Amino acid sequence: MIEQNINENLEGLKVQTDQEATSFFNKIRYIKSLILEKEKIANSELLKVQNWLGKETEELKSKIEFYEQEILVYFSKMKENNDKYKLKTPWGEVSTRKQQQKYDFNDEKTIEYFKLNNPEIIKTKLSESYDKTAAKKLFSKDKNGNIFDQNGEIIDFLIITDQPEKREIKVTE
């Protein structure tokens, strides 16, 4: 592409002939090629900078993971001794959140049980199923992990698993 004079004063420039319009089109094409060339250079440099940044921060991120893990280990030890322990400093804190128990039903045995004991929570579509939300309310778990129904009978078709607390480290910025 022929180099164009694009540094001219734009004030007062007007297209008055086809020849001038052609000249303006050529200037536009030339300017667009300059923009494209600069974008290619920038993208090349951006890729280099992103690669550099990835290499530079990889080790630093692994150090953050190490420090966070050590904080969580310390927090767990303190929590074992004092169930109400909270770790909060001017520079960060560890927050905990209890999670719901996980219910694992053996569906066939559970449907048989509900047909006999709570038929109102059985749902029949193409196949039989049951209302799991309602079912969860009908069972309880003791300290030994045994599952009981409302009548105190031990249930063998359900496993209730306590989920660990969710722990999150928040660093003050």
Image (cartoon, rainbow, N blue to C red):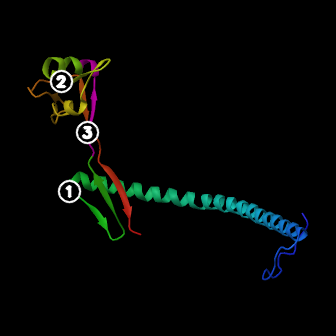
> Which residue ends up furthest to the front in the rendered image?
16
Pick the quarter of the image with the C terminus: bottom left
Left or right side of 70 for 18: right
Looking at the picture, does residue 11 appear above or below residue 24? below
Q: Judging from the image, what secondary structure is the residue with disc 3 in?
A: loop
Amino acid type at image mark 3: Gln
Residue drawn at x 68%, y 62% is 46
Q: Which residue is mark 3?
A: 101
* The quadrant where residue 161 appears: top left
> Which residue ends up furthest to the left in the rendered image?
151
Q: From mark 3 to mark 1, how far is it between C-alphas?
A: 20 Å
Amino acid type at image mark 2: Ile
Pick the quarter of the image with the N terminus: bottom right
- Residue stretch in magenta: 99-109
Left or right side of 110 for 60: right
Q: Which residue is mark 1?
A: 84
Left or right side of 37 for 143: left
Q: Judging from the image, what secondary structure is the residue with disc 2 in?
A: loop
Q: From mark 3 to mark 2, how far is it between C-alphas?
A: 17 Å
* The quadrant where residue 88 appears: bottom left
Comparing 114 with 126, the one in front is: 126
Looking at the picture, does residue 104 appear above or below residue 74? above
Residue 140 x, y percent position in the rendering:
15, 33
Residue drawn at x 28%, y 29% is 104
Amino acid type at image mark 1: Lys
Q: Which mark is residue 68?
A: none
Residue 159 x, y percent position in the rendering:
25, 29
